[in-house]
Structure formats: structure tokens, C-alpha cells
């Protein structure tokens, strides 16, 4: 189960809307969705929460590149919604590295020159391989909106708080009421 909401900061304050991510396949799709919600240069935050296991915040300011924060990259890597946020750049990977895996391994799972693959050799997927346990991304994503990086990181450190993290963030930003209205 997941929850996703768009929060647009307008001249009149924050406006929130629940959003469905079923048609979102890439960070670009998510960014476009956020820009459509703002209708201009306003700041839009995308809140994503997956089964109280992790949360993510994506910030889109006009035409600038999106900024991303994920509370637990390893947990997010196991989620199709988390994979949207865990870009090669965020993970510090070479963007073409995953495309070259087929060049390195023969169809039988052995590397060129190997006799046979050991059944115990399980090769993790490219996202799982590079996703660290714990927070990842821009911890300063909300600093200018009133939430320190230290406070954001504190919400990421305890699994028990994860379910309440988006509410805590919204409360700090002064938009808890609008977030709760779409929850």
C-alpha cells in the first residue's frame, strides 16, 4: 500500500491533492505531473510513502531539475515506486552500467570463460546492488521551507516514525491540514 500526494505552494498557501502513480514510470513522468499541478513557477512537493517502510520527497521548482530525498534507499529499491526516485545520479552509478550487464554475462549465467554458474551465486538487480540502507539524497531539500536537514534525517532513522514522517514534515511546513484532507 502506498500514499502519494502533491503539495503546491501558491500565493494563497499550500494546496494538496492525492495522486495516483500507476501511470508514472520515470522520474521525468513524476516531474511532469508535479509541474502540471503547479501551473507555473511555484514549488511543488511530491510526498510518497510505502507501507510505513520508507518515504520520499521530491521537490520541483519551476523548470529546475527535481531534488530528491528518500528515507531508506534499500527499502525503496524493493518498491516500484521507490525505483522511480532512485536514479543513477542519486545512487552514484554510471547511467550506462545497467545496460551493459548482458554484455558481461552469457545466457547461461556464466561469465565468458567460466565453466558453469554456481547456484549460490545470486546477482542482485542493479538498483538493489547500489542502494544503501538508510537515507539518501538531498537532506537540505526543505531547509528554506522551515525544516532543517537534521530534523528530516531524524524522521528517517526510526522505522516506527516512518508512518508519521510525512505528517511531521507537513506540520513543520505549515501544511498539515491540507495534507490530512487528502489522506
Image (spheres, helix red, strand yellow):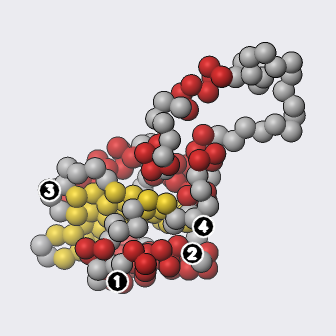
Q: Are marks 2 and 4 in contact (CB under 8 Å)?
A: no
Instruction: Judge depth for marks 3 and 2 and give the one in front.
Output: 2
Instruction: Judge depth for marks 2 and 1 and give the one in front.
Output: 2
- For this orientation, the residue located farthest to the top is 113
Q: Which residue is mark 2?
A: 157
* Quadrant, the N terminus: bottom right
Mark 2 to mark 4 CA distance (whole Å): 11 Å
Q: Nearer the viewer, residue 7 or 72?
A: 72
Residue found 36% across the figure and 50% down from its top = 30
Report the disc number at residue 40: 3
- Judged left or right of residue 36, residue 56 is right
Q: Secondary structure at mark 4?
A: loop
Q: Secondary structure at mark 2?
A: loop
Mark 1 to mark 3 CA distance (whole Å): 24 Å
Q: Nearer the viewer, residue 128 or 28?
A: 128
Q: Secondary structure at mark 3?
A: loop
Mark 3 to mark 2 CA distance (whole Å): 34 Å
* Quadrant, the C terminus: bottom left
Determine crowd level at label 1: few under 14, some 14-19, many 20+ residues with C-alpha closer than 10 A.
some
Q: Which residue is mark 1?
A: 172
N-terminal-most mark, 4 or 1: 4
- Measured along the vertical axis of the image, is residue 46 above or below residue 66? below
Mark 4 to mark 1 CA distance (whole Å): 21 Å
Residue found 39% across the figure and 78% down from its top = 169
Amino acid at each position: 500500500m502506498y500514499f502519494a500526494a502533491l503539495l503546491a505552494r501558491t500565493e494563497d498557501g499550500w494546496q494538496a491533492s492525492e495522486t495516483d502513480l500507476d501511470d508514472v514510470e520515470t522520474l521525468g513522468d513524476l516531474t511532469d505531473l508535479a509541474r502540471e499541478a503547479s501551473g507555473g513557477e511555484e514549488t511543488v512537493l511530491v510526498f510518497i510513502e510505502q507501507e510505513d517502510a520508507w518515504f520520499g520527497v521530491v521537490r520541483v521548482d519551476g523548470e529546475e531539475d527535481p531534488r530528491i530525498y528518500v528515507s531508506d534507499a534499500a527499502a525503496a529499491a524493493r518498491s516500484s515506486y521507490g525505483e522511480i526516485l532512485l536514479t543513477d545520479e542519486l545512487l552514484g552509478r554510471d547511467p550506462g552500467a545497467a545496460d551493459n550487464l548482458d554484455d558481461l554475462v552469457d545466457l547461461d549465467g556464466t561469465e565468458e570463460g567460466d565453466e558453469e554458474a554456481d547456484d549460490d551465486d545470486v546477482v542482485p538487480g542493479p538498483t538493489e546492488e547500489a542502494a544503501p540502507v538508510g537515507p539518501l539524497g538531498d537532506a537540505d531539500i526543505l531547509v528554506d521551507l522551515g525544516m532543517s536537514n537534521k530534523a528530516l534525517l531524524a524522521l528517517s532513522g526510526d522505522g516506527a516514525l516512518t508512518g508519521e514522517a510525512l505528517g511531521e514534515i507537513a506540520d513543520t511546513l505549515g501544511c498539515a491540514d491540507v495534507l490530512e484532507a487528502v489522506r
